[in-house]
Amino acid sequence: MLDAVPAWVCTQCREVYFEETEVDTIQDVMRLRDEKTEKLEVIS
């Protein structure tokens, strides 16, 4: 789902870094997922 998120990758250690806008988007997606999961748990 998040495969197309642009990121910087360190050429030495392969650490991945994201721009602030991408981090915000990832956090929004995670928050929405959590909200939907909570609703499913209440319904079950």
Image (cartoon, rainbow, N blue to C red):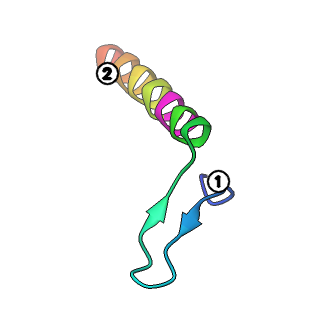
Q: Nearer the viewer, residue 15 or 32?
A: 15
Q: Would you say 2 lies left or right of 34 here?
A: right
Locate the C terminus by quadrant. top left
Kindly identify which numbered label has been placed on residue 25: none
Q: Nearer the viewer, residue 17 or 36?
A: 17
Q: Would you say 39 lies left or right of 22 here?
A: left
| Residue 8, quarter of picture | bottom right
Say above or below: 28 vs 22. above
Neighbours of disc 2 within 10 Å: few (<14), some (14-19), many (20+):
few
List x then y, in percent, for residue 10: 49, 74
Q: Would you say 15 lies left or right of 6 here?
A: left
Amino acid type at mark 2: Ser
Marks 1 and 2, how far apart at CA: 33 Å
38 in magenta: no
Report the residue at 44% width, 85% height from top: 12
**Comes first in the chain, label 1 or label 2:** 1
Amino acid type at mark 1: Val
Say above or below: 41 vs 33. above
Magenta segment's dominant SS is helix
Kindly identify which numbered label has been placed on residue 5: 1
Q: Secondary structure at mark 1?
A: loop
Magenta stretch? 25-29
Q: Which residue is mark 2?
A: 44
Q: Secondary structure at mark 2?
A: loop
List x then y, in percent, for residue 34: 38, 27
Say above or below: 31 vs 5. above
Say above or below: 10 vs 24. below
